[in-house]
Image (tube, grey):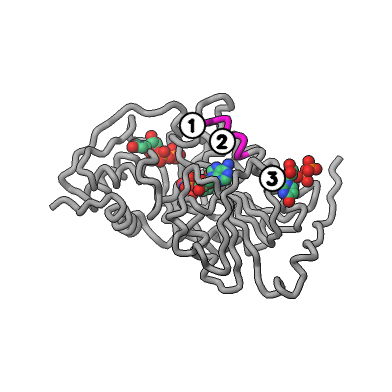
Amino acid sequence: HVVTKKPPTPSPLRNSKFFQSNMRILVTGGAGFIGSHLVDKLMENEKNEVIVADNFFTGSKDNLRKWIGHPRFELIRHDITEPLLVEVDQIYHLACPASPIFYKHNPVKTIKTNVMGTMNMLGLAKRVGARILLTSTSEVYGDPLEHPQTEEYWGNVNPIGVRSCYDEGKRVAETLMFDYHRQHGIEIRIARIFNTYGPRMNIDDGRVVSNFIAQALRGEPLTVQAPGTQTRSFCYVSDMVDGLIRLMEGENTGPINLGNPGEFTMMELAEVVKELIEPSISIKIVENTPDDPRQRKPNITKAKQLLGWEPKITLRQGLPLMEEDFKQRLGVSKKA
Ligand code: NAD
Ligand code: UDP
Ligand code: UDP
């Protein structure tokens, strides 16, 4: 049977005079795409001290360059599959490769990161009495038989496929979060993030928006994976960060969907990129990968009601912001 324990009291260190006014926040995976934007936002608040723990598998120090040396900021090279001892009030737990080519590169490691990594962060949260937020994913819905997806939908996931290290890994991570919550009284928050894009995405990470923008800027054909009628819904990263902070600060455990309900087929996305970035570019259909979900669109009623959140930036507004960043990093100027 389930014993619900009271949340542990915060560590006495946290009650010392030095710490009284500040909120100390751990961001795992903070050197990555979403994590580094989250760190930027958290650092804007002078009462926040931010610690990033990252093994730099897909993230980079470059993403955090402006904070290195700042008195309220610390960067630790750490793999979260190993235990971590720090004293913090909040944990944003993002560490996990998000792009299919990276999470499939070493699938056993992806599982370890999701399972052992999340367990370590929950053990840490339990020891110090911190609130912990997990960035789960719309992939927990698998190839969904319900459309759009609500949080009540249990999903349609292949347990033995090449994507399972990621989607089943995140499903176990969600289970661990709820078991630590029920059994040990840990304060948890779960965000189910839908496809997110913006500056600092890895240029060659294989995700569709980064691929199309890099291809358009390099003058290469846009590679639409067959059949091209599959859909995704794309959220700009600043909207995502705003949603994550609202979820952490609010009173609801979730899971809560965070994403932009604007739904596009991959062919439509290619057409928009072509129109906005390089009208002379061609579009070619290429082979797809196994278990590619055919459609995905968040129902964000809960986020609207419980967090007062909805995305503000449309795809047509967000793509040019990302184009600027990619142009600088690729060192290309837009073809005339
Ligand atoms: P990302 O790959 O840019 O960032 C992940 C970060 O985690 C990287 O800095 C990486 O080095 C670090 N990391 C990976 N394994 C680690 C380990 N074992 N120990 C320590 N650090 C480790 O990905 P992102 O797009 O910023 O995604 C961040 C989170 O959001 C992930 O948990 C991802 O599953 C989730 N998410 C992202 C999307 C999206 O569209 N970007 C969608 C759904 C969910
Ligand atoms: N853990 C950690 N940092 C801490 C406390 C715990 O990394 O500050 C790790 C710990 O090593 C363990 C995991 O979190 O592997 C789960 O901790 P818990 O206390 O739940 O389990 P136990 O240590 O009793 O197995
Ligand atoms: N995709 C595509 N061309 C690419 C890369 C991806 O058409 O160059 C498609 C892919 O088949 C999938 C969608 O874009 O249907 C989103 O893929 P991504 O890897 O970005 O995210 P996820 O599958 O994790 O949602």
Is 222 on the left or on the right of 244, as rendered? left
The quadrant in which the N terminus is found is top right
Mark 3 Cβ and ligand 2 under 8 Å apart:
yes
Q: On residue 83, which mark appears?
A: 3
* Magenta stretch, residue numbers: 105-114
- Sequence-first disc among 2 and 3: 3
Label 1: which secondary element: helix
Report x, y in % for residue 86: 69, 56
Report x, y in % for residue 105: 48, 31
Label 3: which secondary element: loop
Where is mark 1, residue-wise? 104
Is 333 on the left or on the right of 4, as rendered? left
Q: CA distance from mark 2 to mark 3?
A: 17 Å
Mark 2 Cβ and ligand 1 under 8 Å apart:
yes
Crowding at mark 1 (Cα within 10 Å: few <14, some 14-19, many 20+):
some
Amino acid at the residue labelled 3: Pro
Q: Residue at the spot x=71%, y=73% of the render? A: 18
